[in-house]
Image (cartoon, rainbow, N blue to C red):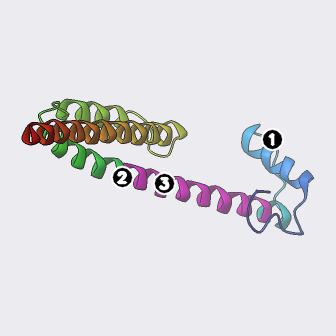
């Protein structure tokens, strides 16, 4: 909550926060009053904002990976370099086993993006090498 752009409101009280925490996670007694409700509401709003942000990040990462896979598959198969369909399918299956809003899912997507980048660089390098050989052959 302290990392919010607005910071914590002036009415924020750490002792009430501890009461809310105790009520939620330790099944402690609940003394419901306006302050308790305000703290609980702010915590809920913050968690919803975090959840929404993670959801957007997950969807965006997945979209980037899906688009990159499509482009890389067409290029790689067009060059006869590899059968990347199996690779793509195994990645999709692995991602389905992770909760979409988890840190692990986001990390897996980012790792996949790095691997796709390396694969794209390898394909580009292979194309450059092929063109170089052809060019040298035509000049001889």
Picture layout, residue 57 above or below residue 79: below
Residue at the disc numbered 3: 57
Q: Is residue 46 left or right of residue 33?
A: left
Question: Mark 1 — residue?
Answer: 28
Residue 64 — which label? 2
The answer to if 49 sits in the magenta stretch is yes
Q: How would you classify the magenta stretch by its main secondary structure?
A: helix
- Looking at the image, do the residues carrying marks 1 and 2 touch, with CB atoms under 8 Å apart? no
Pinpoint residue 83: horizontal percent, then vertical percent.
15, 31
Looking at the picture, tell me which residue is in the foreground, 31 or 97. 97
Q: Say above or below: 64 vs 80.
A: below
Give whichever of discs 1 and 3 has the lower sequence position.
Answer: 1
The residue carrying pointer 2 sits among few (fewer than 14), some (14 to 19) or many (20 or more) residues within 10 Å by Cα, namely some
**Mark closer to the observer (1, 2):** 2
Residue 77 versus residue 44 in the image, above or below: above
- Magenta range is 38-62
Quarter occupied by the C terminus: top left
Q: Which of pointers 1 and 3 indicates the residue nearer the eye? A: 3
In percent of width and height, residue 136 lies at 14, 38
């Amino acid at each position: 909550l302290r990392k919010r752009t607005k910071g914590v409101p002036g009415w924020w009280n750490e002792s009430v926060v501890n009461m809310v925490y105790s009520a939620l996670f330790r099944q402690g007694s609940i003394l419901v009053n306006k302050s308790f409700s305000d703290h609980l509401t702010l915590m809920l709003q913050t968690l919803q904002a975090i959840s929404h942000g993670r959801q957007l990040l997950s969807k965006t990462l997945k979209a980037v990976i899906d688009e990159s896979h499509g482009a890389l598959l067409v290029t790689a198969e067009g060059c006869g370099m590899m059968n990347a369909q199996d690779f793509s399918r195994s990645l999709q299956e692995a991602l389905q086993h992770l909760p979409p809003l988890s840190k692990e899912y986001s990390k897996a997507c980012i790792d996949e993006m790095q691997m796709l980048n390396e694969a794209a660089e390898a394909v580009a390098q292979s194309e450059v090498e092929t063109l170089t050989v052809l060019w040298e052959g035509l000049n001889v």
